[in-house]
Image (cartoon, rainbow, N blue to C red):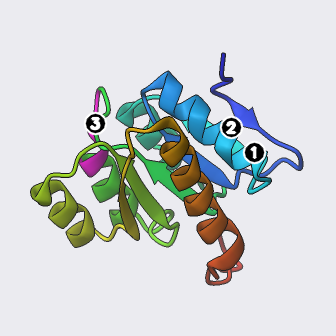
Amino acid sequence: MLDTGFVMTDGSVEIILIEDNPEHAELTVRALKRHHVTNNIRVLRDGAEAVDVLLPRDGSNPPPARLILLDLKLPKLDGVEVLRRIKHDERTRMIPVVVLTSSAEDRDLTECYRLGVNSYIVKPVDFQQFSDAARSVGFYWMLLNQLPPVPADA
């Protein structure tokens, strides 16, 4: 069973995976770890939990993250609303968000890009293709993509 807490080696979180399907979450985490993309992953199971963790109500800073992988079809609060809140808040606006979803609907794709998503990927149905997609996403965003420096007051 996948641990839904932090998986850490040095105290930091590199990827926040927001995914309600335990099999998809486990497959994504395994693909990233097997290919040594990252060891520091936090899995959040629904939209409300994601908002609570990423946008603390007390105004404190969220856990530092280099990437958010976001499913759209989430319980409690859907992924589009989570994306809206992430990109609207100064504390999380600069974190790259990759939608990793089963929805190929044009309206979801258009709305996510309108809200500022960095990438939109439809989950492959095939097990190996899904694993390869997760690895490729992680490799690009964690190893190749350059992020802006974190401001000193963050």
Measured as percent of width and height from the top left, residue 5 is found at 67, 29
The residue wearing badge 1 is: 33
- Tell me the tag on residue 73: 3
Q: Is residue 150 visible?
A: no
Q: Does the magenta stretch include residue 121?
A: no
- Closest to the observer: 15 or 64? 15
> What residue lies at 21% left-to-right and 61% top-to-bottom?
109
- Closest to the observer: 43 or 130? 130
Magenta stretch: dominant SS?
A: loop
> What residue lies at 50% left-to-right and 67% top-to-bottom?
96
- Closest to the observer: 19 or 151? 19
Q: Quadrant of the C terminus?
A: bottom right
- Callouts 1 and 2 close, C-beta under 8 Å: yes
Q: Marks 3 and 2, how far apart in space?
A: 21 Å
> What residue lies at 57% left-to-right and 52% top-to-bottom?
132
**Residue 107 falls in which quadrant of the image?**
bottom left
- Tell me the tag on residue 30: 2
The amino acid type, in three-letter code, at marker 1 is Lys
The amino acid type, in three-letter code, at marker 2 is Arg
Seen as rendered, the residue at the extreme right is 10
What segment carries the magenta color?
76-80
